[in-house]
Amino acid sequence: MQRTVAGEARWSVQLVLEGVPLQKEKNIISERVSALDIGPATVAGYGAEDAFLSQFCDEVIHPWRAIKRDQRGLDRSRRATNPDNYNPDGSVKKGTRKWHRSNRYQKLQARIAETQRKLAATRKKQHGQLCNKGLALGTIVKLEKLSYKSLQKNFGRSVAVRAPGRFVGQLTRKAANAGGRVEEINTRKTFVAESSLNMGWEKPNEENSG
């Protein structure tokens, strides 16, 4: 597998062995039911013996301004080296065109790619740590079924940085490897039973009800 790291091509080989992976002592697996509540910036977990509330991927700090500045530099360089590919109003001409990329353009492009690679690596690491933390509460994990399109619409930057959908996918795989599962619950189809104990309501007196 080829990857580009710091502007250089790196090759790696993945070795796959048959069997069950070794569980580290720090990653305690509990064969119980747990629940996770995933928010735009926080994750809460609850189990029979413990609970936690932590920031969601707090180490993933996205340099929005720096990347936007580099992207503007890409556009300026592309226009300066390819003037024939643009109309007088600045729009790109239709049809297949040959694009020339200067050394400065390639350096900016590599810098953006390296920044995105580091963010992805940090996010993947923190997703794995959070999965282990959640599975320590119980391998049968119950989650609210989320609409990631809705989250993207309302919390675009937060979702782009933390990738909750990717986290749930990794959690599902880890739970299955540990002999458990992830159950997504549709909250629109759930209801709270009417009870004077948990809601503080009192049932009306049938004799006095008109």
Image (spheres, rainbow, N blue to C red):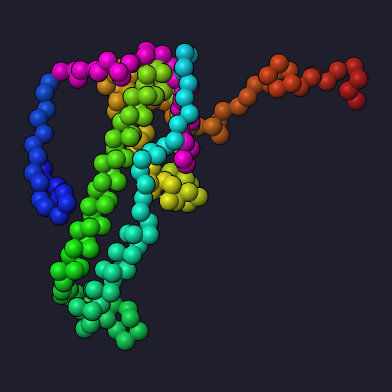
As drawn, 191 above or below 61: above
Which picture quadrant has residue 193? top right
Q: Is residue 189 left or right of residue 206?
A: left
Which picture quadrant has residue 17? top left
The magenta stretch spans residue 44: yes
Residue 183 in the image: x percent, y percent?
42, 25
Residue 189 seen in the figure? yes
Most common secondary structure along the magenta stretch:
loop
Kindly identify the residue that appears in the image at 88 percent across and 23 percent down: 209
Residue 165 seen in the figure? no
Kindly identify the residue that appears in the image at 26 percent across and 52 percent down: 115
**Magenta stretch, residue numbers:** 19-46
Residue 26 in the image: x percent, y percent?
30, 18
Query: Where is the C terminus found, in terms of image quarters?
Result: top right
Kindly identify the residue that appears in the image at 48 percent across and 14 percent down: 48
Kindly identify the residue that appears in the image at 22 percent across and 76 percent down: 95
Residue 210 or residue 126, whichever sits in front: 126
Residue 52 in the image: x percent, y percent?
47, 25
Residue 67 in the image: x percent, y percent?
32, 59
Query: Where is the N terminus found, in terms of image quarters?
Result: top left
